[in-house]
Amino acid sequence: MKKHFCPCTPKTAFERYELSQGLLAKRCPSCAAVLLALEDYRQWRDRHFPEIPVAEPAAVPGQEEHSKVRVCPSCQHIMGRYRTGSAESFWLDYCPGCQLVWLDKGEWAQLEASDLALHLDTILTERWQRLIKERKTLSFRDALLEKRFDAESLPEIRRVKNWLDAHPRRKDILVYLGENH
Ligand SMILES: [Zn+2]
Ligand SMILES: [Zn+2]
């Protein structure tokens, strides 16, 4: 990997760093941010963990940060942001062009604690990001439902909705109900 600089303090060069046993990355000695090449990560994982279980998005503890935008230390383009999990989860920064992952201080430890350290490349897929979005929408809708209706009606509303969603004439029924209130 060529020489990279961290923007935290002007011209702090990243230094060679062993992120996990046998996994070489780079680390800023000033802010402890880690720069990880996805290719190095994949090789390390495949060598040490040839069989990994399939992961599903879950809640990953961590601060939601929406505003912060990172610039790739290699190509200077803005890095993409990827949610690690549903609910309150932190975001990973990744440059698809350079295939570089940026980990803020402590984020690798959080991934390990959430059993996601072996699924870094899965997190960066469209499928994972889409699943998280769907789950977030679902839990948001659930929260709205619980706010608007009493506890007794909730199971009935959910039952009717499931029945309706599976019905081949769902649209017609909805139109009919809409016309009759
Ligand atoms: Zn730094
Ligand atoms: Zn880049």
Image: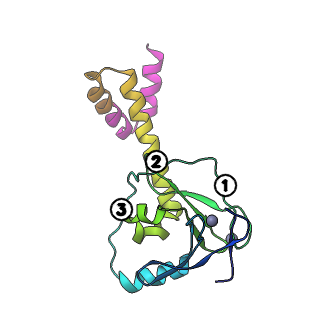
The residue labelled by disc 3 is 113
CB within 8 Å, label 2 to label 3:
no
**Precedes in sequence: disc 3 or disc 1:** 1
- Measure the C-alpha gap from mark 2 to mark 1: 24 Å
Report which residue position mark 1 lands on: 69
Looking at the image, tell me whether mark 2 or mark 1 is earlier in sequence order.
1
- Judge left or right: residue 53 versus residue 30: left
Specify the label residue 134 is tagged with.
2
Q: What amino acid type should be assigned to the residue bearing mark 2?
A: Glu
Q: Provide the secondary structure element on which disc 1 rests.
A: loop
Q: Main secondary structure of the magenta part?
A: helix
Vertically, is 46 above or below 123?
below
Q: Earlier in the sequence, mark 2 or mark 3?
A: 3
Q: Position of residue 172 (x, y in %)?
A: 45, 29
Residue 160 rendering spot, x and y as whole percentages: 31, 30
Ligand 1 neighbours mark 3 (CB distance < 8 Å): no
Residue 172 part of the magenta segment: yes
User: How is colour applied across the structure in the image?
Assistant: rainbow
Position of the N terminus, as image quadrant, is bottom right
In 3D space, how far apart are the residues under numbered discs 2 and 3 (Cα atoms)? 24 Å
